[in-house]
Amino acid sequence: MPDPRVFIIRHGETEWSLNGRHTGTTELPLTSNGEKRIRATGKALVGDDRLIVPGNLAHIYVSPRHRAQRTLELLDLGCRERYPWKLEEGKPAEEEVRTRAPIQVTEGIREWDYGDYEGLTSARIRELRKEQGLSGDWDIWRDGCPGGESPEDVTQRLDALISDLRTRFHKHRFGKGAGWKGSDRTGANDVLIVAHGHILRAFAARWVGKELRDNPSLILEAGGVGTLSYEHHRVEEPAILLGGAFVVDVVEKEQEERKA
């Protein structure tokens, strides 16, 4: 069984993500193309023989913003819980349930608060700063946003979330007995986070203890998926998982079916 993992998924494409405008609190819908891509991501990466195994999800965190919540819906995980933003709807049929992971809407994973720079592109922000007599060499990772959050603000809230996540869902969850296919067949290791570009890049940086002011130099496209885990089967050694191995038992099962 793989070590516990965290899957980070950036919401699908919006009009502002297309043209590079910083989108924090502004509510924007996904574009038609954005919805199609997220559906394709769900079909390609979600399943018992895929990267994200619904039955092995212990918890789902999602941003309060509608674009992130819509992205979670489109992934089609087969959640047993009703979406917190759709409590008036009935529960899904039992045969559609693929995960019993609780869904938590949390401010801890909302997008970086851009403050005065909300809705502006990086190029316009640099022009504006020059007009204000400030340095045009603006870097969000170093300078933050006036009227919004600093790198220290973001670090504080992400570190609190990471600490809670590891304590609740990953500590003592290593080895053959862990996970939904472990010895008791009831456990679950993985955590899914659906949120936004800057905050998820910052989350990945803080996951491995990198200072945001150093610029984490990480990229996560709209609708993109990243994986975080651990080295040497130790919660004390967090790591970014650059690539995982293919599922062997699926191939073996297909070979057995062909022989039958």
Image (cartoon, grey):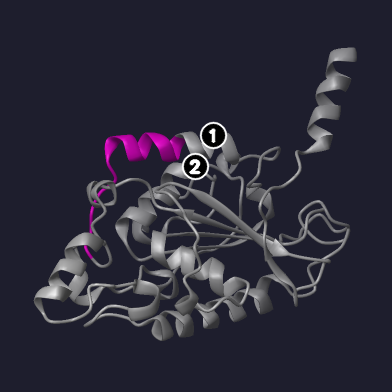
Q: Position of residue 174 (x, y in %)?
A: 82, 66
Query: Which amino acid does the dot numbered 1 rest on?
Result: Lys
Report the residue marked by disc 1.
43
Q: Which residues are magenta?
A: 26-39
- As rendered, which of 237 and 164 lies closer to the eye? 237
Question: In percent of the image, x 75 and y 38: which residue is there?
Answer: 246
- As rendered, which of 222 and 103 lies closer to the eye? 222
Report the residue marked by disc 2.
76
Question: In percent of the image, x 38 and y 56: which residue is there?
Answer: 68
Question: Based on the displayed image, in which of its 4 quarters is residue 115 positioned?
Answer: bottom left
Q: Residues within 10 Å of mark 2 (few under 14, many from 20)?
A: some
Mark 2 falls on what kind of element? loop
Is residue 260 in sight in this rendering?
no
From the viewer's perspective, is residue 258 above or below residue 238? above
Query: Which amino acid does the dot numbered 2 rest on?
Result: Asp
From the viewer's perspective, is residue 43 above or below residue 210? above
**Of pointers 1 and 2, the one earlier in the residue sequence:** 1
Mark 1 falls on what kind of element? helix
Q: Position of residue 126 (x, y in %)?
A: 21, 68
Question: Mark 1 and mark 2: span between their CA atoms?
Answer: 8 Å
Where does the C terminus fall, quadrant-wise? top right
